[in-house]
Amino acid sequence: MLNKRHLPSIAALQCFEAVTRHLSFTRAAEELNLTQSAVSKQV
């Protein structure tokens, strides 16, 4: 069974979803009002 500390945060999941939808860290960052670096670190 998964331990809670192994689950990603909601913010990380939102970043991952945006990146996969746009196929771009830059476009995901623009959508989420974050820097490209912040999105990259979350993923």
Image: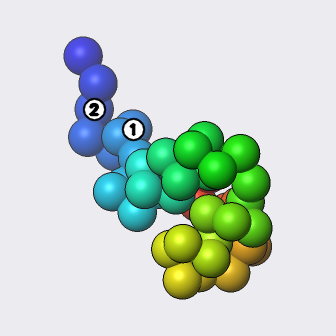
Compared with 40, 4 (above or below) is: above
Q: How is the image coloured?
A: rainbow
Screen quadrant of the N terminus: top left
Q: Is residue 38 left or right of residue 3?
A: right
Compared with 3, 16 (above or below) is: below
| Residue drawn where x is 68% and y is 81% of the image | 35
| Residue drawn where x is 26% and y is 40% of the image | 4
Determine crowd level at label 1: few under 14, some 14-19, many 20+ residues with C-alpha closer than 10 A.
Answer: few
Q: Which residue is mark 1?
A: 6
Amino acid at pointer 2? Asn
**Tag on residue 3?**
2
Compared with 33, 20 (above or below) is: above
Q: Is residue 5 left or right of residue 22?
A: left
**Please, what secondary structure does the residue beneath circle 1 have?**
helix
**Tag on residue 18?**
none
Answer yes or no: is residue 13 visible.
yes
The total of numbered circles placed on residues is 2
| CB atoms of marks 2 and 1 within 8 Å | yes
Determine crowd level at label 2: few under 14, some 14-19, many 20+ residues with C-alpha closer than 10 A.
Answer: few
Q: Nearest the camera: 5 or 23?
A: 23
Q: Nearest the camera: 7 or 22?
A: 22
Could you tell me residue 19's position as x and y percent?
62, 51
**Please, what secondary structure does the residue beneath circle 2 have?**
loop
Q: Nearest the camera: 40 or 26?
A: 26
Answer yes or no: is residue 38 visible.
no
| Residue drawn where x is 68% and y is 66% of the image | 27
| Residue drawn where x is 54% and y is 83% of the image | 33
Amino acid at pointer 1? His
Q: Is residue 1 left or right of residue 19?
A: left
